[in-house]
Amino acid sequence: MRGTARQSGQLFGYLSPESLVPQEHPLRAIRLLVNAALERLSPAFAAIYADCGRPSIPPEKLLRALLLQALFTVRSERQLMQQITYNMLFRWFVGLAMDVPVWDVTVFTKNRDRLLEGDIARGFLAAILADPQVSPLLSSEHFSVDGTLIEAWASMKSFRPKDGSGEPPGPGRNGERDFRGEKRSNETHACTTDPDARLFKKATGQASKLCHMGHALMENRNGLVVDATLTTATGTAEREAALAMVGGLPEGGRITLGGDKAYDTRDFVAEMRRLGRASYCRFVQPLDRKGFSEV
């Protein structure tokens, strides 16, 4: 028998986001680890918030929302707020009931800035790594390091000469700008909307973009990130960040470190030996899509 397509609304609903998430969903295990880490960070939250005044977004919910943005590659916080509005999985993970309004994106951004200025993001990562379920998975001997470009949220039209010269963009919100024949570099130009962004490319033949550089240090047993940082994009940023992250590892025996050809320099190897940490450095270069060749 064919069912009817007639839609009928209900005055009341009795479902909760918890009942809509399958028991085997991977976010359930992640949420348990996150909740335990946030509980350990509660004293740090209390130190950066005032005892009186208007209540802000709870830091626990804010961090859960930011984690969802990273896990599901949500492009912007405005889209994140939209997803939390109608995505029951997101509402459940953050900890919002079905009838609770979602925060305004401007309020969310201001609260996020205040939270991250207190170095909570690094403490959040450290609290998860210290979890009794996670710490046995970490290797203390074998690590890999790598860097990647993070494109800045800035237009190339904002990359202007530092002396104030140059042709301005055309009229309108997104006016045209002719760059043909113009030589631009980080020495003579700077981004007006994101001063920390640099014009950079990682390989010959690629287009230069305004970007930052992200770095991650991973242990090799299960491929878990044990440290991460963000720097300006320079030709030496990967090696400098690697030295800082390796130097921040807990004191112990010597380690092995793997990296690509960007780290294969005499100065980097000498500095690792001076630190007395790396007993073996392995540098690899891409061979094809199926594997790597060791150098």
Image (spheres, rainbow, N blue to C red):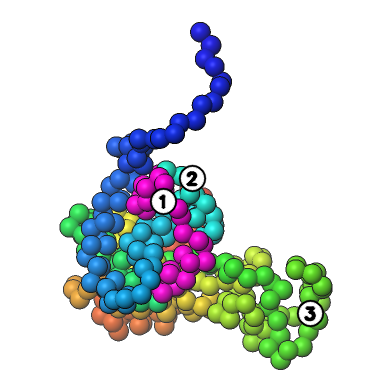
| Residue placed under numbered mark 1 in the picture | 100
- Badge count: 3
* Viewer-nearest of discs 3 and 2: 2
Query: Which residue is at 27% across, 62% downward?
Result: 38
Q: Please identify the residue farthest to the top as the structure is shown.
A: 1
Q: Quadrant of the C terminus?
A: bottom left
Which residues fall within the magenta stretch?
A: 89-116
Judging by the rendered image, the residue that carries numbered circle 3 is 168
In this view, 40 is above or below 23? below
Viewer-proximal residue, 254 or 222? 222
Q: 22 or 11, which lies in front?
A: 11
Q: Type of residue at label 3? A: Pro
Which of pointers 3 and 1 indicates the residue nearer the eye? Answer: 1
Mark 2 or 1 closer to N-term?
2
Bin the neighbour count of mark 3 within 10 Å (Cα to Cα): few under 14, some 14-19, many 20 and up: some
Residue drawn at (27%, 73%) of the image:
46
Q: Secondary structure at mark 1?
A: loop
Q: Which residue is mark 2?
A: 86
Residue 201, located in which quarter of the rendered image? bottom right
What's the residue at 68%, 78% (across, down)? 159
- SS assignment at label 2: helix
Residue 23 is at least partly visible in this image: yes
Q: Percent from the top left, x then y, of residue 216?
A: 39, 66
**Residue at 30 percent of width and 51 percent of height:** 31
